[in-house]
Image (cartoon, rainbow, N blue to C red):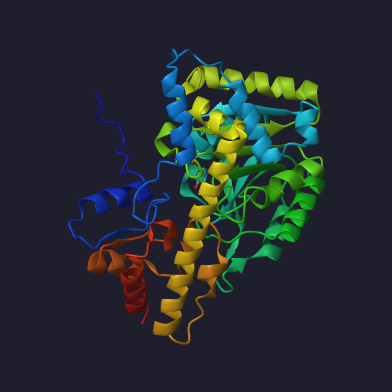
Amino acid sequence: MFEHVDYYPGDPILGLNDLYNKDTRAEKVNLGVGVYYDEEGRLPLLGSVLKAEEARAKTPAARPYLPMDGLPAYNKAVQRLLFGADSAAVAADRVATIQSIGGSGALRVGAEFVKQYFPQSVVYVSKPTWGNHISIFEAAGLEVSEYPYYDAATGGVAFDALIEKFNSLNKHDVVLLHPCCHNPTGVDLTPAQWDKVIEVVKARELIAFMDIAYQGFGDDFESDVYAIRAAEKAGLSYFVSSSFSKNLSFYGERLGALSVVSPNADEKKLVLSQLKYIVRRLYSNPPCHPAIIAADVLNDAALFEEWTNEVAEMRVRIKAMRQRLFDVLTAKVPGRDFSYITTQRGMFSFSGLTPTQVERLIQDYGIYLVKNGRMCVAGLNTKNIEYVANAFADVLK
Ligand code: PMP
């Protein structure tokens, strides 16, 4: 009956997690999966979230079906966070936002929409990108290709090559962009570079699809959405997928959003109706609990402030770990420039380690990172940083 079924060997990043869990060494360190662990190596439950949940628990409520597009109070809060309280597009009712099943769900719903209404469009992703970007758009039946991004020689962005590529694309081709904390490299565009990208996207009539999963982990909540705000000011019609997995520590709650900015309120209505129809056929409607809690945190001034402070703490801790790693490696491996560790932003660092060096870290030290050398800096803490830095120095020598 099922002999013809192909075996799915699993996701390389999630597979790494399984190997880590099976490893019995006490000193093992997980720098593989993109998850924020605190100084104690634990997945945090945020204080702001706990307060919102405790308040809700005092008046337990039924669990109704949400509308296909999710909880209205949540969707409004997402728009404020991404586009700003003074967004002209939101005020003009030009932005369709739906609650989604994590950032992944937002990408898939967006991909389905693109496939249906721009079937000839090719989706261009950065080289490299988060692997699931390619899988999600291909699964929707779209052709996926790459644009130059990371320049291994400089550790920066191959910006001229990127612009040249964008200038060669066809009208309505999709360019998938990471507004902040690029996954996997940690290398971001500057505001001036974003301005240029948006200018080319507009001139070539490309479709920008911005995927933001780490808002708050770069500089701050506002600076991290520079690209999203600049695209709005430039008058683009574009897509934004967003996720609360990392910044609300809501991984398993599966909460994100898809926003589509349209040229006018009439077109927004058409777009929103189709996004709902896509959702109806995929999973009917999203879960109510995570949206209620997120809306409570985002819509209450005191909880919002507490939350942004908690994310700032995470960001500062990651930066301190980057600095310590830089200091130890610079002292132990003379003649090599490790400045990329402190200039990269967000959870990830492209460590420059080769697959062989990564394999040695796993085998000899129980330090797990992705084969391409991507390390999740948030897996470091003051207890394991010296161990990891020394191991890195050893395999780099
Ligand atoms: N986009 C990027 C760039 C990501 O790194 C991730 C999570 N690793 C996602 C989207 C998906 O987020 P979620 O877990 O909320 O589906």
Report if residue 142 is visible in the image: no
Q: Nearer the viewer, residue 177 or 170?
A: 177
Instruction: Tell me what residue is drawn at x 73 percent, y 36 percent.
Output: 85
Q: Nearer the viewer, residue 304 or 258?
A: 304
Instruction: Tell me what residue is drawn at x 81 percent, y 43 percent.
Output: 233
Q: Nearer the viewer, residue 218 or 137?
A: 218
Q: Position of residue 322 (x, y in %)?
A: 47, 67
User: Where, quadrant-wise, is the N terminus in this rendering?
Assistant: top left
Q: Position of residue 30 (x, y in %)?
A: 33, 56
Report if residue 18 is visible in the image: yes
Q: Which residue is farthest left?
A: 24
Q: Is residue 188 left or right of residue 84?
A: left
Q: Position of residue 95 (x, y in %)?
A: 72, 29
Vertical placement of 171 versus 185: above or below? above
Q: Quadrant of residue 331?
A: bottom left
Q: Is residue 155 left or right of residue 131?
A: right
